[in-house]
Amino acid sequence: MKYLHLVWASLFRRKTRTVLTLVSIIAAFLLFGMLDAVRTSFNQAGQSANGAVRLQTGSKLSFIQTLPLALQDQIARVDGVKMVTYANWFGGAYQDPHNQVFSFAVPSNYLDLFPEIAVTNAERKAFNETRTGALIGEQLAQRFNWKVGDHVPLQSTIFPDRQGSKNWQFDIVGILHATDKKSGSFFDQTFLLNWKYFDDTTPYNQGQVGWYVTRVVDVNQADRVAKGIDALSANSDHETRTQTEQAATASWMKQLADIGLIVGSIMGAVFFTLLLLSGNTMMQAVRERTSEIAVLKTIGFSSRSVLAMVLAESVLLLMLGGIGGLALASAVIPAVSAGSGGMLNLPSVGAASWGLGLTLMVLIGVLVGALPAWNAMRLNIVVVPGSGCSTCWSAATRRG
């Protein structure tokens, strides 16, 4: 564009205002990039299980519904299943309900399916032989200053014991260490208790499990294995849904809230605010340059050229901030995924997100620049009578 230097100069005529507006646009598109990654992650979850080493089987009706323990042997006999275990959500809190602890009741073979978790043979043996034994994550131990041998009271926010009390007592027999900080750091913050102790102590379980975890023989056959597991309980009162671990987490979240609606509402509010902010910036910029626009028209710029330059300035403002925001999101998202310990597996800002983002930048740029560009185009040049100068002008009057 041969007038790019004029557009650039006009854009940074008031540097402080432009920089502050750019910061706001960068923040808006950073949020857009991250929220769109969340939306994409939830939409893609569960589309295919192939490539997954482990599968998770839960109730098809709701994640709070339990499954019969007898299903374990049936799942173990499905072709392609290498090993199967199970777990129950305990819902523990330490001292205060706000001190939530990721706590699960698991059987003795649970850690066999998670090679990314390190625990000594002696600690595994103590966990299996101690009814009230508990294995805790390394970070959880540091958080509450726990160590092996401590007697720890934990309050369940869900399950009371047979006396009606929700206060449970545990003995710490081992510390869990994540050997792979990227995929296993979630276990650094978990509390594993003995499933047999849990099932015997609360009257609200009675031989039921929350979900099954299955390790497959061939990751390329995971989809087929998942369908085979779900076929076991088809048309029963405990139908199942087998998914990857990431898809199961996404499914739980979807049952708690409409993720798409939440993400869409936040993004709508952000961009509506961005329209007002950038629109005000462009209106002020054009009002301050009334005489300069008149100069351009006097030296031969057409009204359409002025219109195009103001629109280009508006779009350039949105493009600079938007591209910066999406680039920042591309750098931040991997760090967020890594820091979540496997709880969040957000995709990077892909071609589809970039395409949608660039479309929004242009659209918003045109919308916020339309009115000031139209006003600039309609400005008239009028010779001031009696001035004695044929090159004098006034842009104070408008056509019509």
Image (cartoon, grey):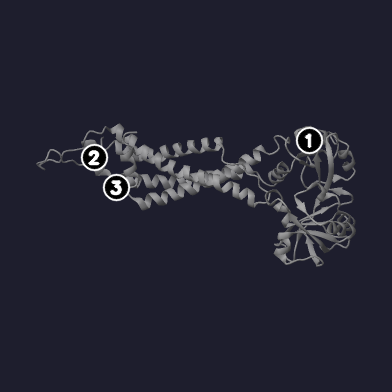
Q: Which residue is mark 3?
A: 288
Q: Nearer the viewer, mark 1 or mark 3?
A: 1
Q: Nearer the N terminus, badge 3 or badge 2?
A: 3
**Residue at the spot of label 2:** 294
Q: Quadrant of residue 218?
A: top right
Compared to residue 227, the image places residue 261 above or below, namely below
Where disc 2 sits, the SS reads helix
> Which is in the foreground here, disc 1 or disc 2?
1
Q: Which residue is mark 1?
A: 218
Q: Counting other residues with Cα less than 10 Å from the Cα at mark 1, is it few (<14), some (14-19), or many (20 or more)?
A: some
> Residue 325, percent across and down?
49, 45
Give percent across and percent down for residue 339.
Answer: 63, 52
Q: Is residue 41 left or right of residue 235?
A: left
Which amino acid type is shown beneath numbered disc 1? Asp
Q: Earlier in the sequence, mark 1 or mark 3?
A: 1
- Horizontal side of residue 201 vs 117, given as left or right: right
